[in-house]
Image (cartoon, grey):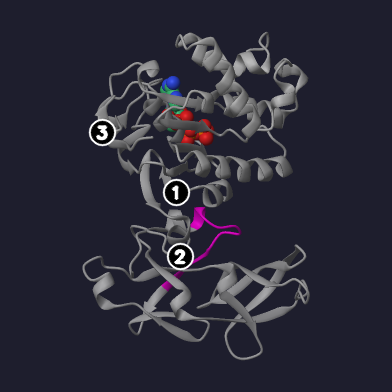
Amino acid sequence: MATVAFQGVTKLFPGGDKAAVDQLDLDIQDGEFLVLVGPSGCGKSTSLRMLAGLEEVDRGAITIGGKDVTDHQPKDRDIAMVFQNYALYPHMTVGENMGFGLRIAGEDKAEIKRRVEDAAKILDLTKFLDRKPKALSGGQRQRVAMGRAIVRKPQVFLMDEPLSNLDAKLRVQTRAQISALQRRLATTTVYVTHDQVEAMTMGDRVAVLKDGVLQQCDSPRRMYEHPNNVFVAGFIGSPAMNLLELPLVDGGVRFGGEVVPVPRSAIAGIGESSVTLGVRPEDLQITTGAGLEVTIDVVEELGADAYVYGQADINGTRQPIVVRADGRIPPERGSTITLSYAAERTHLFSTVTGERLVD
Ligand SMILES: Nc1ncnc2c1ncn2[C@@H]1O[C@H](COP(=O)(O)OP(=O)(O)OP(=O)(O)O)[C@@H](O)[C@H]1O
């Protein structure tokens, strides 16, 4: 177990017009489950590979357990990595695959056997120990890859999209198993995914990257309730937060007949004439009173909930909006509904910089 720190870590690939990872600063606690998430190409795999020692760091430093490992070989970092494709040796049995790293490290045979059997028990793989990987399901192979990592008892687990080859149902099950296993072993884990649901359900903290730049690193709840900028607001949550550009009038923005106040101090000096108001689909309510009128284009019925997609007339322009409604009494497509909201459940961002304006 160990802390991990990225200190101003930068990666420039030859030919790239900007840094793949740009001055990444991140402190990961001992035993923490930290998820790196972001869209394709945001630099999450490169960050993980630099931590693993599979990619060179151009600027900055990486420490594990307080020790600078920036120039250490992967084998000298005391980490174990689980890859997307599992990277199992097809000619070896499950048991041999799991014990491989220990054998290379010159571990005693009896000790290898004991650790492999322990890991197999934890991962429910005991009856497969003598099989070859090709005789296993995708989920079982994934567990073997996990097993190979845990028998090493490393200081840090690194996982690069380890669930992406599983079908949706198995992914949900395995997600919970990995979370439970990580909590039980309390080993510092850095986990890469592009799936924000995976990030939110698994991470103690989530680090959102965009274009190689860290946007925010917080607990899932904090990230959801207090996104630092428009990108995080739109990336975390499904369906995404509604983000509406509204002109500034009378010390605030007019939304659905009400004025959401924008403190003068928040916009002082940035010359804004409009702000971006964010409101999550579940923070809008269908009302019989006055409010924001929305014409419904599509209703997605999910059982308990229905997501209602429509167009709102906001200050004379039509803007798309999505609302979570009660799935038992969903509104009808083509009809018009009126929405109310609580001003304290809205988020205000600069239209110019995208940064959050009010805490
Ligand atoms: N070996 C390489 N040579 C040149 N450029 C690279 C190399 N590896 C990655 N890149 C570039 O660096 C940036 C970050 O890539 P990276 O693989 O870290 O992103 P990612 O967030 O993991 O994306 P994905 O989810 O698609 O795997 C991208 O612009 C990518 O094209």
Mark 2 falls on what kind of element?
helix
Q: Nearer the viewer, residue 131 or 328?
A: 131
The CA distance from mark 3 to mark 1 is 21 Å
In terms of sequence position, does the residue under pointer 2 or pointer 3 come before the other? 3
Which residue is tagged 3?
Answer: 66
**Residue 114 drawn above or below residue 259:** above
Q: Nearer the viewer, mark 2 or mark 3?
A: 3
Amino acid type, residue under disc 3 in the picture = Gly
Residue 57 percent across, percent down from the top left: 30, 24
Do we see residue 149 in this rendering? yes
Which residue is tagged 2?
Answer: 225
Bin the neighbour count of mark 1 within 10 Å (Cα to Cα): few under 14, some 14-19, many 20 and up.
many
Q: Nearer the viewer, residue 54 or 176?
A: 176
Outermost residue toward the front in this view:
110
The CA distance from mark 2 to mark 3 is 32 Å
Which residue is tagged 1?
Answer: 206
**Residue 326 drawn above or below residue 227:** below
Seen at 23% across and 71% down, the residue is: 268
Where does the magenta region start and end?
234-246
Amino acid type, residue under disc 2 in the picture = Glu
Seen at 66% across and 32% down, the residue is: 165
**Residue 193 drawn above or below residue 303:** above
Q: Please tell me whether residue 37 belongs to the stretch shown in magenta.
A: no
Q: Give the quarter of the figure containing the C terminus.
A: bottom left
Bin the neighbour count of mark 3 within 10 Å (Cα to Cα): few under 14, some 14-19, many 20 and up.
few
Mark 1 falls on what kind of element?
strand
